[in-house]
Image (cartoon, rainbow, N blue to C red):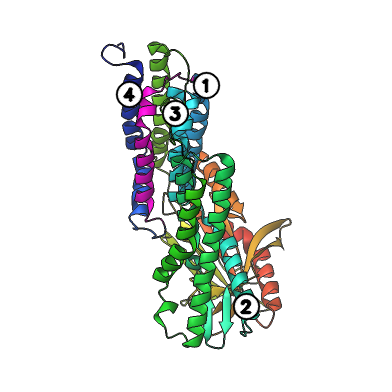
Amino acid sequence: MDLTTNLSPTRARLFAYLAFVLIFFIAYSDSMTVLFNLWTGVEQTIYQYGFLVLASTCYLLYLKRPQIVAFRSRPTGWALLPSLVLTAVWFVASLVGVQTVQLAVLPFLILAMTSAFFGTKFLRLIGLPILLLLFAIPLWWPLLPFLKDATTLVTEGFLRAIAKPVFVEGYFLHLPGGSFFVDDGCAGLRFLLVTLILSFMSIDLYALKWKQGLVLLGIAVSLALVANWIRVIVVVLVGDYTKMQHRLVSDHNDLGWVVYAVVVLLPFFFLVGKLMTKEEPHPANSIHAGQTASDSKHYLLIYLFALIIMISGPALSAMVRFQEYPDRVVSMPQSSQGWRTTSNTDPAWKANYLDASQYLYSQFEGAAGQVELHIFNYANQQEGVELINVDNTLTDEEVWRTLPGTESQFVIDLDEGGTIDVLSAEIESESGQRKLLRYWFDVGGLHSSGTYSAKLYQLIALLNGRKDASLIVVASDCGFNCSNAQELISSFTGDMYSSITERL
């Protein structure tokens, strides 16, 4: 078949590329469904602007259609190598259920495949518009702690500067009129992402030089941070003055966008007007990939290999997902090693781990005191129903909360010899009851004391024919400094660790 029979080589390849993109969306439909749910606010509201980002990408590409059609392409076979690597990354991420990595890989996979079809210089035309989609993907949550720290620090500094009495405890700001918690919504991540989208759109739309782009980015990001700080400070001052009675205390989203429009948007568009050049942003003949079109057979070969690479990740993932694994029975250890079961009544605290297949709880009493053992088992981990998930937390931060600065790692000596690493945290209830927690993960029989290693072990467990994983928590009520609870938990875990793991 000769692609050039009725069409020019470039137009034929564009039509073939559009067909490829359609197959891409079908092959990765699971990931597309996750994106759709994010952008429609089914799971969370922070990324509801995703469809606007998609529309912006399409608009920027539409403006470049004359250059795209006139582009003299030169297929690049070696670009299939990064495509293969990215497909493998997506496959591994799908096995261990890391949605963020799965979604983040997709724009880069599209660009890698595109460079194979049309040449790497073609990325100068479509690279930035496609990468805009990254700002509508939930891979920016690692910024939240830093943004919350900055917001808390700036708010505290301002209150002290105006002689307002304030006591800071973690992300809590205690004032005479009430206490304020700087949660994820107060971090200003949405304002920051919208600012980055506007900045990169302007850089591409007006063909700003890299120095101009850096100036625009630096000023715009700084203004976005300042706007969020102003919003939080206003809410704190109003809440303190009205003894937490004003509606802004519970709903200050509209206030945030008003402040954003004044502090960010007005200076931003003024600055863009100053930086933009008077030349056409995308001259029609600005990019040349070569003087002749590549051979059609060469292109078809690349196209065939690209299709195989693209489909292989979802196909292998589906095979693993539908494979059956043997059921495992999880049970509590029996009384032994000087520890005996005393009660199985409902616990005062229970970890906020959702959709577990089985939850087991018992109280054990030894010579020195009493401990609690909690086991959350996920018998058949799959996307959204898994041990390591952003929605799974030790506390709900309402009835119980994790005390700031108490999360750490700890080493426990085992009775049979050796040591294990565990995670440690102190929690407190609304009534002031405190507990010390020591916990770890068991992923397909592999011990883990970290979320990243637990995800890695999930892949190893799959290769060993297991999809189960468990959270094991040993808890004890605290005294003034939790020292007695620490000794109790270390003693119980050292004595009973083998008995616990044998029953998982």
Number of residues whose C-alpha sits closer than 10 Å to that of mark 4, classed few (under 14), some (14–19) or many (20 or more): some
Residue bearing the label numbered 3 = 113
Could you tell me which secondary element the residue under label 2 belongs to? strand
CA distance for labels 4 and 1: 19 Å
Could you tell me which secondary element the residue under label 1 belongs to? helix
Quarter of the rendering containing residue 4: top left
Residue 143 lies, with reference to residue 204, above or below; the image says below
CA distance for labels 4 and 2: 60 Å
49 inside magenta stretch: yes
Residue bearing the label numbered 4 = 16
Q: Which residues are magenta?
A: 47-76
Three-letter residue code for mark 1: Trp
Tell me, yes or no, if residue 139 can be seen here. Answer: no
Residue bearing the label numbered 1 = 78
The residue depicted at 48 percent of the width and 76 percent of the height is: 398
Residue 264 point in image, percent of width and height: 48, 60
95 inside magenta stretch: no
Could you tell me which secondary element the residue under label 3 belongs to? helix
The residue depicted at 38 percent of the width and 54 percent of the height is: 49
What type of secondary structure mainly makes up the magenta span? helix
